[in-house]
Image: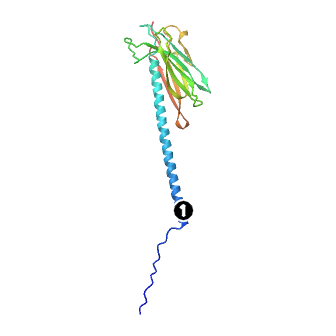
Amino acid sequence: MTTPRTSTRRAPRGFTLIEMMLAIGVLALILTMLASSFSTIAHSKVHAEGRLMVDREGRALLWQLTKELRNAVQTPYTASNVALFGNGHMSNGAPVDTMTLSTFSGGHRKALTGMTPETIVTYNLNSNPDQPGWFILQRSQQSGLLTSTAAPQLTTLADNILSLHFRYFDGQKWGESWESSSLPQGRQLPVAVAIQIQMAAPGGQVMDFATQVTLPMAIQQW
């Protein structure tokens, strides 16, 4: 009589608790590394976009200051209110200068015919109450032709200024201030103005902007 064979095949064995814990631990480690990488990339992207925005703001400030300085009023061909006052100040070891000038408003036309009215413009810094060490750059303007004391128009240009420095060249040397009212007629404007701006950027970085502007109306033949 033939004896039936006994099957030796074993039932499939599951994972042990230790194996499950090891697998979960490895998976958690991988997910943590991925999350950290994604967070770093996201922060880098945000900071890069913030620095790009600050770069645009700084270049726009230099462009606006350059346009207004190049159209500073001093001409013998039409009545003009010659004015350029630059005052140097320091705060926590950083220059926070102010400047007031008379310029042609609107399109800043250089032609002597069809000029728009003169405008008195002031650039001034005030402490930023929300960020110690930062300053708010404000631009105020009012008509230089009005006899009444109309309220000036005030515009905030930036709230992350760290320093603003103007230097004035009279044709021979550079100075830290300028007073047009104390100078003879026809020489009341500097030949050139150097502008240096420091702005705070994301990540605690500092961005520098600088330019040098020549004033076409600085020297007039009277």
Residue drawn at point x = 55 percent, y = 36 percent: 204
Q: Residues within 10 Å of mark 1 (few under 14, many from 20)?
A: few
Name the residue rendered at 52%, 64% in the picture: 20
**Image quarter in which the N terminus is found:** bottom left
Q: Residue at x 48, y 15 (%)?
A: 142
* Residue 72 drawn at (x, y percent): 46, 15
Q: Secondary structure at mark 1?
A: helix
Residue 94 position in % (x across, y down): 59, 26
For the C terminus, which image quadrant? Answer: top left
In the image, 188 versus 55, the foreground residue is 55
Residue 62 horizontal/vertical position (percent): 47, 25
- In the image, residue 76 above or below residue 105: above
Label 1 belongs to which residue? 22
In the image as oriented, which residue stretches furthest toward the top? 222
Determine whether 16 is above or below 145 in the image: below
What is the three-letter code of the residue carrying label 1?
Answer: Leu
